[in-house]
Amino acid sequence: MEEEINTGNSSSPPYSDQQEKVKEEQEVVKEEEEELHKLLVPDIRDLPLTPPSVVDSNYVSFFAPDFIKPGHDQYVYRHANGLCVIGLAPTHVALKEEGGVTAIDFNVGKSDRSAIKVTGKRKKNAQHFEPNSALCKVCTNDNFYIVRCCVKGSLLEVNERLIKQPGLLNSSASREGYIAIIMPKPTDWPKIKSSLLSFEDYEKLKDLS
């Protein structure tokens, strides 16, 4: 009897070492592309319901609650370049009064803070202030409150827009209603930071969380 010829499909020959190496490299490239895609195009389920504000994106928030006096709560938003934006925290006593802030006066201490004009890269004419130095006086229908620097540094500008539009403190104190911008020395910042609260600690202290 003649030997039967096997016509079935024989198993494929094993990959050579070179083919295995190419396959592994392709898998690595695929994984890297998937990781890059995740970074560039995040899962919509992971995105916040509302986009972060400019403050949330570019600044680190710190707070000086009950600064000098109870209820005198202020914020310090620090930019990566070291600049600090100073303003009234949402829990400041002035913002809780009926009618809120009605006027603001930068003529405090021995000079009118709004008259300080800083120029050039060297910040010519910038005045140096201590944390407890007065920045301005905010007025309500029945009282007035002194707003202070909270940080040691050079006063670069005050928000003169508030003189004609004090209501910005009631509607947008953390943005358009900021009080001033101060530049501390980099060497002073660690000590300044230790005197302030983080956003999380501020929320806990004021029972906002």
Image: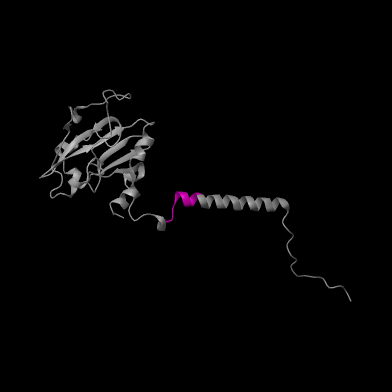
Tell me if I can see residue 194 in this picture. Answer: yes
Tell me if I can see residue 81 in this picture. Answer: no
Rendered location of residue 30, percent (x, y): 57, 52
The magenta region covers: 36-43
Q: Which residue is drawn at 48% across and 51% down?
A: 37
Rendered location of residue 176, percent (x, y): 23, 41
Judged from this view, the residue extending furthest toward the bottom is 1
Report the quarter where the C terminus lies.
bottom left
Judged from this view, the residue extending furthest toward the right is 1
Q: Is residue 199 shown left or right of residue 101?
A: right
Q: Is the magenta stretch mostly helix, strand or loop?
A: helix
**143 versus 31 height, above or below:** above
**106 versus 51 height, above or below:** above
Judged from this view, the residue extending furthest toward the left is 142
Q: Which residue is drawn at 30% across and 51% down?
A: 205
- Front residue (pair 27, 167): 167
